Amino acid sequence: MEEFEPKIVAFLCNWCAYAGADLAGVSRLQYPPNMRTVRVMCSGRVDPVFITKAFKQGCDGVLVSG
Amino acid sequence: MTQKLLGLAGIGAERLHLAWVSSAEAQRFAQVATDTIESVKTQGKFDPGAFALELNAAEMTLAGETLRWMVGKAKTLTTKGDIYGRKWDAEKYESVIHSVLEREYHKNLILCAIKEGCTSVRAIGKKIGLELKRISYLLADMEKMNIVAFQGMENSIPIFAAL
């Protein structure tokens, strides 16, 4: 059986983590491809309801990063 | 708080991660991403169908005004004090929020169970696995708030309906 690959929704702040993720891409750092990124203008924009919604739609984990 | 609620709902607080990464920290971001994925991997697959009731109740709790009000007032109440000038201890306030969170979540769980057609206390208990005493207690509270209504007796079992 192949290894379980979780689906993760990542809410990234445009100014912090998203830029960090971008830089990680530019500098060719390797990280697993399981993340589906949602860019928000601030991590304060993330409502707890977004998180339950993500779980409802069947994702396995959520990362909020700012 | 959302993590606590996910833990309470049996979904697992470990499925939600929170991390601060600055724009210059590409290395750290890659590390956070790897750690999150590893942690969720150990949790295994999440089946939203099996947790539909819990997810609905959790969403209603998080969207409800009680908790939003309490979180919004936290800063004022712990630094400036309430209208009587009493300053709340941050830890005490946290524990109050936690108990309100649990209570609101259980209430919403009961409401979801009633909407799914469980009308007696026993049927609700079977559906959501909560203590019967706690359900009766919360039902009485929900009745006062006009969320549920007592519909009368059926074979000497009290029947409830959602409003």
Image (tube, coloured by chain):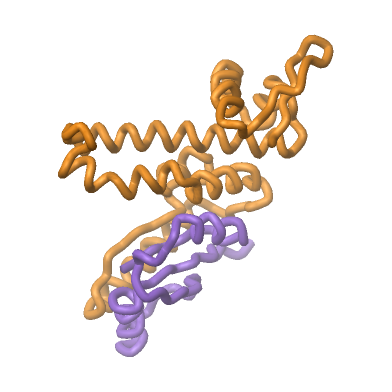
Q: Residue furthest bottom?
A: A26
Residue B119 position within the rendered picture, expressed as x and y whole percent measured from the top left: 74, 27
Q: Is residue B27 above or below residue A7?
A: below
Q: Please tell me which residue is depicted at 29% across the width and 78% down the height of the picture.
A: A15
The x and y percentages for residue B51 are 62, 46
Q: Quadrant of residue B54?
A: top right
Compare residues A14 and B19 and report the one nearer the observer.
A14
* Residue nearest the viewer, comparing B59 with A57: B59
x, y percentage for residue B4? 41, 42
Please tell me how many numbered marks the rendered image carries: 0
Residue A38 is left or right of residue A17, and the answer is right
Q: Which chain is purple?
A: A
Residue in the image at 45% along x and 55% along y:
A48
Residue A46: % across, % down: 42, 64
Question: What color was chain B assigned in the picture?
Answer: orange
Along the line of sight, the residue nearer the viewer: B29 or B106: B106
Residue at figure coordinates x 29%, y 37% from the top left: B94
Q: Quadrant of residue B116?
A: top right
Q: Is residue B35 above or below residue B127?
A: below
Q: Is residue B88 above or below residue A65?
A: above
